[in-house]
Structures are given as C-alpha cells and as structure tokens.
Image: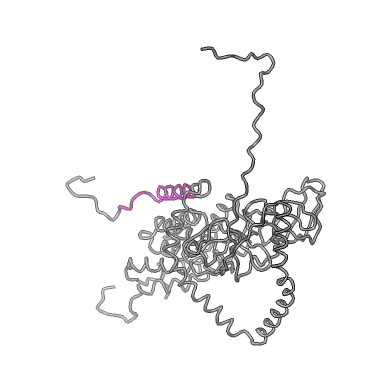
Amino acid sequence: MSVVGHAPPPFFKRGPAPLVRLAFFVSLSLVLLVADLRFHTLEWARLAVATAAWPLQRVTGIPIDAAGDVGGYLSRQRSLLGENEEMRRRQLGTANLLLRQDHLEQENKRLRALLEMRERQPVEGRIAEILYAARDPFSRRVIIDKGSHQGIAPGQAVVDDIGVIGQVTRVFPLTSEVLLLTDKEQAIPVAVQRNGLRAVLAGAGAGMMELRFLAANAEVQVGDILVTSGLDGVYIPGLPVAKVVKIDRDSSYSFARIICAPLAGVERHGLALVLGGRTALPPQPDDVPATPDQPTRGKRVKKKVR
Amino acid sequence: MQPTHSSRRILLPVRNWFIVLTLFLALVLNLVPFGRFPGIPDWVALVLAFWCIHQPLKVGMAAGFLLGLAMDVADASIMGQHALAYVLLAFVAAGWSRRVLWFPLAQQALHVLPMLLGMQLVMLVTRMIAGAEFPGVLWFLSSFTATLLWYPITYVLLTPQFQPEDKDVHRPI
C-alpha cells in the first residue's frame, strides 16, 4: 500500500505463504495422481516427454553399456569355448525335433482340415533386445529396443527361448515397455499341462507368481508345468509359463494358495522375441437377455389404444 | 573451514544458471539405467534438498514440482508420485534451512536423512494405496547413501561461491 506515493520495499515480498503454496502444489499432485490412476488420461504427455528425452536416455546408458562390454571382453576364452560346445550339443539334440517340425506341421494342418477345425494361427515374431529395467522400484517392467516404428503394438506377448516373459504395455517410437509376468498387475490365463486344468496366474511380487482362485482340493501338484491356455486372445496357446513350487492347502480358506516360479528368465536381461498380435477371437456371445417380460400375475397388460 | 553459518566463512552470491545446471545434471544422473541395484541415491532429491536449504528464496516447491514431473516420466511411474514427494521435501527443507545451516556438516547430514526417508515414505504410501508391491527394505538404502554424499556434495555445489583464500588487508570484510 503506497502511503506517500512510494511502493513498499520489495525485499519482504515473497509471494504467498509457504503453507498456501504447499497446499496448492500438493493438491495439484493429487489431481495428477488421480487423473493418471483412474482415468489414464496422461499417456499423451508421457509419450511426448519420453520421446524428447530419448537421446538423453541413450547417452546416459553409454557408460553402463561400455562397462558391460569391457566385462564381456575380459571374460575368459575358456568360458566362451565351453559355451560354444554346449550350444553345439544342444543344437544337435534339438535337430531331431527341428527336422521333423515341418513334416509334423503339415500333418497337423491336414488332420485339422480333416476334422474341420479352425487352423492354428501362424505367428511371426520380432527379435528385440532388453535394454534395461525401468527405474520404478514398485513395478516390474523392462524396456526393449523396438518401438512403434518397428511395428510393435501394445498387448503383444514377449517370450524368450524358454517361455513367456510378459506383455508390451506402452509403445514409444523407438522403444517399448514390457510389463513382466511377475508384476502384481499382470495376470495371464494358463492351463496345467498335465491335465488341462484352466486357471489364472497372477504376479505376486518378489519374482514369484500365484495361481489364483483354484479350489483347495484342485488337481495341482508341485512340479506341474503351466502353459498358456490362449483363452485371452493375446498369448498363443501352449507357451510354457511357470512351474508350481509350493502349495498351501488350508481348509479354512476356500482357495488353495499355489506359488509358482516363472520358467523363462523373466528377471534376466538379453534377447527376447515379441510375438505378432493374434487375430481377434470370435466375439463373445452377449449375455442371455432376460426372459422377455411376460405378464405377471395380477398385472394387467395394457394395450395401447390410439 | 566448513561453509556453515557459525563458521563466519562468507560466500559469494550464487548464480542462477549454476542452480539450474546442477539440477539438470542431477536429472541426467537419475536417468542412468541402474535397474534394481539397491543403494543408488536419488540425485534429484539430494540436489533439490541442498538448494532448498542453501537458497530457500530461489529454489522451492515449484522447482520440486517440475522436477517431480520430469522424474515421473523418466521413471515410468505414476504421474504425480515424485511430484508430491519432492514438493513435500522442498517444503520441509526450506522450512528447516534457517536451523540446519548453523550445524556442522555431519549434523546437517543427520537433518537431511529424515527428510529423504520421509520423501521415500510418501512415495511408498502413494504407490501402496495405488496397489503396487512392496519394493523391499533395501530400497530405503538409497536415502542413506545420499546422506553420506552430503559432505562431498556441499563442497562441490558451493565451489563457485568460495572466495579466494588470500587475505586482502584493504578489503572491508
């Protein structure tokens, strides 16, 4: 307030009080949190900023990559030779299967045609390298080096040489984000390989998974292999997923607690295969409509008279 | 002599571009993909707390909010998680700055430790409410490494403000 034509000296002006500012920024952050968690409206902002920050992110990754390269260079020749030998042995071991694969596929096709079943969809894959694990310690995600420019789309399944790793959740122009199977938010429909029992496998954190909603007396044993059932239209059926490690059958709960360990090197780094999207399954039948309203007793049917 | 209020060591005024540069470098350091290796300090939180304590009139909650948004995107976490935690950190750090700067560096670090732990706790509570998994106790190790870094980072960030050691008898102060 100017009393005699002078403004008050500026060094006491500090804007709103700290508590007011705190309340403003905290409420702004909470609005952002709710907007992102509940409505998923901020993906475009994330995409824009992540694309702009991509070169910077690659530059910061250089020292780590270089350290890995130096470590690899210094690894002993003997271990390389051993690895080579092992690879050759494995190739010979699988040659038998590989040579017959073509023949078996043809035969399968013919038999399926005879049975008039839907043909199994051929799936093509794209090899990608896992760059690094996302920094967020609360979720299990990795970043791979293929993005929408290479034709990756959200929802595609990612596998390695042993089994399923996870699913592509976010796609940036040159990278994509893969949600690992062990994340708490990830669920995958599976079937027990031994008897075809279907269930849903969900991440349980700490690198493990849990087979949910199976009755306490369900026919599952320790050591059972779980494969994808393909009911979701995302994963092709028959991919190995996990192995049952521990079963708690507590009769006081209606469901058994079944802990599984992933088969694939979910938490390791290396190469992965992004499978092409499946063609959509036939649409689910609509819910059976409620029985057409029949005149109930005591209620008169009114006829419209014009 | 340690650069604290009680030591009568007079510093040159800070340059604004240096504050911006150090905060940006901290952001870049945070982008280095270490994966789930425990004990990597949150550089942005550390440098932000430093400037909030040393320059509470220049760096405050607005800077914390913007840096938090940048970290939310870089981390692929939920939007607002880092922003909320950094804003609270900036508020506490700026509020305590008058008190903290009178202590020697080791005791300053002991003040910074609960600030950083509180910031991690805010993030933990936010994410647990949103339904994420507990990242493990080792995750809190990063606050302790950051606290150990308080001593070196004070000297690094205050280097441009130190005056030459040679005494000038004609200088008034």
- Tell me which residue sits at (52%, 79%) in the image: A66
Q: Horizontal and vertical percent for residue A42?
A: 46, 51
Q: Horizontal and vertical percent for residue A244?
A: 76, 59
Is residue A235 within the magenta segment? no
Nearer the observer, A230 or B142? A230
Count of numbered marks: 0
Q: Is residue A259 above or below residue B142?
A: above
Nearer the observer, A171 or A4? A171
Is residue B101 in sight in this rendering?
A: no
What colour scheme has been applied to the protein in the rendered image?
Answer: one colour
Q: Quadrant of residue A203?
A: bottom right
Is A68 placed left or right of A260 in the picture? left
The outermost residue toward the bottom is A77
The outermost residue toward the left is A5
Is B19 placed left or right of B141 in the picture? left
Is residue A19 within the magenta segment? yes
Nearer the observer, A158 or A118? A118
- Tell me which residue sits at (70%, 59%) in the image: A109
Is A3 placed left or right of A285 in the picture? left
Q: Horizontal and vertical percent for residue A84?
A: 67, 82
Q: Is residue A302 above or below residue A6?
A: above
Q: Main secondary structure of the magenta part?
A: helix
Nearer the observer, A257 or B81? A257
Is residue B24 in sight in this rendering?
A: yes
- Tell me which residue sits at (52%, 69%) in the image: B33
- Tell me which residue sits at (17%, 47%) in the image: A5
The span shown in magenta is: A12-33
* Quadrant that contains the N terminus of chain A: top left
Q: Horizontal and vertical percent for residue B144?
A: 56, 67
Q: Quadrant of residue A210?
A: bottom right
